[in-house]
Amino acid sequence: MLDISHKYPTLRSAVAEAKLSLLPETVVAVKNRQVPKGDPLEVARAAAVLAAKNTPALIPYCHPIPIEFVGLDFDLGESSVTVQATVKAIAATGVEMEALTAATVAALTLYDMLKMLDRTMAIEGVRLVKKRGGKSDFKESLERPLQAAVIVMSDSIASGEKTDTSGRMIEERLQKEGLEVVEYQVVPDEPAQIVRLIQNLADERSVDLIITTGGTGFSPRDRTPEAMEKLLEREIPGIPEAIRAYGQQRTPYSMLSRARAGIRGKTLIVNLPGSRKGVAESLDFLFPAILHAFPMIWGFGWGMSHKGE
C-alpha cells in the first residue's frame, strides 16, 4: 500500500456506473416485481452497500476508510438497466474504487437474480463517472505568479554553527508550487532585526507570501511570536491552529508550537517550526489550500480567482 500518512482528510465522493443489457421482457418483469427471487433492485442496493464497505478486503492495495454514504440509482431502459453508485467519505484518500466496486456488485447481483429469466444478459461496462475531493480540488488559478520570501530564524545557523535545511526545504517547495522565491535570508533570533526585515519585504517590496522557520518554541531565544506582535495587522489564527491539529496527529509535541500567521498590507505571513520534519508536515498541510488566501487578500472575494465571475 502507498503511504498516505502525510495526507489530511477531506470530503471525498465518487460516482460510478455499470450497465446491464437484457431482454425487454426482463425489464418489464423487474418493473412489475415479477422476478421469482424477489425484488432485484432492492437486493442489488443492499449488495452495493456491502460491496463498498468491503472493497479493501477485495482489492489488496485499497486503503480501508470509513464510508459515510452509499447511494444507488437505477435507470431502467427498454433493454438495459444502468446502475449508478455514489460513495462519500471523509478520508485521506479517494473513494473511486468503492464506487466502482459497488456498481459492479450491484450489476452482478442483478445478473444473478435475473439469469433464470434471461440468458442474453451481459454487463456491458463499468466506468467512473466523476470523483471529487483531495488536493486537486483546491488548486488555484491565480491572475499572476506569486512572489515569496523565506526567512530562517536561528542563532546557530546565523553564526555558522549549523547548516540550514528547513529554509531550503521551504524554498524548494514554494518553487515546486509555482511561486517565485525572491528572498532567502538567515537571521538570528533578534526581534528587532526580524521586524525590520519583514517590514521591508511587506511594505517596500510588496512580497505576497513570507514564510518563516524557527523561533516558535519555549527557549529564551525563541522570539518569533513576539516579533509577529509588532508586524501583523490582521491575525489569522486558523492557519497555525490547523497546522498544530494536523501535526498533533503525528507527534504529541505539535501543541507546543507558538507559531502565528496573519496579514500585513497585502502580504501573508506564516510562521513554521524550525525542525525539518515539522516544516515538511506543515507544507504538506498548507499547499495548495493556502493559495486561496490571495484572491481574498486582493479583494476578489471567495472565488477561485478574479475572472469576472
Image: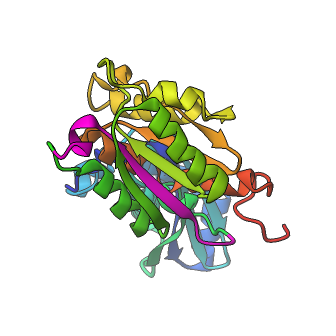
Residue sitting at 60 percent across and 57 percent down? 208
* Front residue (pair 297, 229): 229
* Front residue (pair 236, 94): 236
Residue 95 on image: x %, y %: 43, 54
Q: Residue furthest left?
A: 161
> Can residue 146 be found in the magenta stretch?
yes
Q: Is 257 drawn above or below residue 181 in the view shown?
A: above
Name the image quarter holding residue 120.
bottom left
Q: Residue furthest right?
A: 308
Residue 56 on image: x %, y %: 27, 50
Residue sitting at 21 percent across and 38 percent down? 156
> Can residue 48 be found in the magenta stretch?
no
Q: Is 72 drawn above or below residue 22 in the view shown?
A: above
Which residues, given as a range, are shown in magenta?
Answer: 143-160
In the picture, the quarter occupied by the N terminus is bottom left
Q: Locate residue 205 relative to residue 7 in the image: left or right.
A: right
In the picture, the quarter occupied by the C terminus is bottom right
* Front residue (pair 117, 5): 5
Residue 69 on image: x %, y %: 53, 42
Residue 113 visible in the current orientation: no
